Amino acid sequence: MSAPGGVEVVNFGCRLNIAEGEAVRDAATRAGAGNMIVFNSCAVTDEALRQARQAVRRALRERPGANVVVTGCAAELEGQRFADMGARVVANDAKGLAASYCAASVSRAGLKAGSPHQPLALGEAKGVYTPALSGADHARAFLGVQTGCSHSCTFCATVLARGSARSATVEAVVDAARTALERGQREIVLTGVDLASYGDDNGTSLSALIEALLELPIERLRLSSLDPDRVDDALFALITQQRRVMPHVHLSLQAGDDMVLTRMKRRHRRADAVRLIERLKTARPDIAIGADLIAGFPTEDDKMFANSLALIDDADIVFGHIFPYSPRAGTPAARMPQVGRALARERAAILREANARRRHAWMDAQRGQRASMLVERDGLTGHGETFAALTLAAPATPGSIVPVRLAARDGDRMIAERIAA
């Protein structure tokens, strides 16, 4: 949010967008923009697109004097639609440029040059990615280290919206991490569209980046979603042996049936995922597993869905990011035989219920255990090392890391009592 007459940025979707949102705010402020609201949109599902359209319509209706700008993935995929509403459109690759928010604008393919709704800037040629660091208003610092994806999963429109994978340099990421540490943030979350591919384009690797970051006095380093087929020996060792790398692994699994995985063009199979998780938990038993899962992928029958449902227990998934499949225009999966949105939603609900049971059992088993809690800005809530959501019985200093004992579960959170170090 911003002061009246300033720049307000509304982020939708992933942690990378949260990190990039700060670059958007900075760029628009440097450009001297005023009375501007920028929607940094997401397009991972139909619901994400619907939310972006709804928010833009509301802003145009309720704030008629504001400069309404749309950027992000939804702007890439539906730029003309947002322009027709009356919003200005900024390409994803240009959203961190001050020139994108100046009064002068440039025409773009698909939009009429000279129209009042043309975009503010064209995207730069896709090249080296500049790290994106979230603002100081977060207890944790989200640090975007790469964007784009060079894979061709049949359900995903990310490559259409963000292009092929590009990575920031190790030196630039380390500099951004120093900034976060200097302003007092004690946990850094590495994020990207395809984080595990970091360095593929510039001769380094995610494990090399982590090693460089651990030379800094970072107290907690957390990784966002990883493709299971990219967890090599070096990355495995860092996750399981470095105590400052948090015991929380989120994997891009997507399904638990081999035929569905094949039709998705994923690069792992069910047994690969289960075996990796077994190895991780053997090497570091406190690791908590999260996973992305799609319900109702085209051609998914009852048996295929049952395999995905069973994966929640077989892979000990306690943090499921579960959503129903929705067809993305321009992707191969959109042309496959569909199972129907109602059935996809029903199956997603079943997966979420199963995941909640697994998570609650996992949380209940932690009663009485000690944990280290990063306190959020409200002074009462936060997360443990495993990313378990915690609530303090009494407030603590925002941004601090405090030792606690887990007393009881309250829904999806644990009540935590502060104890002596």
Image (cartoon, rainbow, N blue to C red):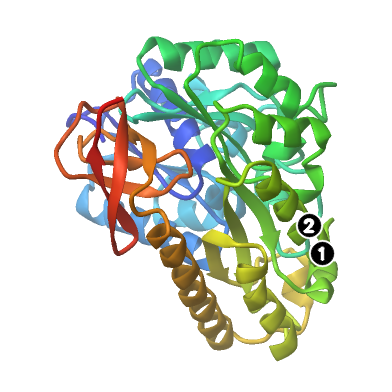
Please give the name of the residue rendered at 50% of the width and 30% of the height, measured from the top-left corner: 105
The image position of residue 85, as x and y in percent, is 41, 57
Q: Which mark is residue 275?
A: 2
Position of the C terminus, as image quadrant, is top left
| Residue sitting at x 67%, y 14% | 212
* Residue that badge 1 annotates: 271
| Crowd around label 2: few <14 · some 14–19 · many ≥20 (10 Å) | few
Q: Secondary structure at mark 2?
A: helix
Q: Amino acid at mark 2?
A: Arg
Q: Position of residue 36 (x, y in %)?
A: 31, 34
Q: Residue 78 got which mark? A: none
Which kind of residue does numbered mark 1 sit on?
Ala
**Viewer-closest of 68 and 293:** 293
Q: Label 1 to label 2, Cα distance in Å?
A: 6 Å
Q: Are marks 1 and 2 in contact (CB under 8 Å)?
A: yes
Decide if residue 127 is in sight here.
no
Around disc 1, counting alpha carbons within 10 Å, would you say few (fewer than 14), some (14 to 19), or many (20 or more)? Answer: some
Q: Answer above or below: position of 384 versus 254.
A: above
Front residue of this view, candidates 194 and 46: 194
Apparent side of residue 121 relative to residue 281 in the rendered image (left or right): left
Find residue 401 and report its image quarter: top left
Q: Position of residue 210 (x, y in %)?
A: 66, 23
* Residue 205 placement: quadrant: top right
Question: With respect to residue 64, does 351 lie above or below?
Answer: below
Q: Name the foreground residue: 5 vs 366.
A: 366
Image position of 206 with respect to 216: above or below:
below
Where residue 142 appears, x then y in whole percent?
48, 31
Residue at disc 1, secondary structure = helix
Pick the quarter of the image with the N terminus: top left
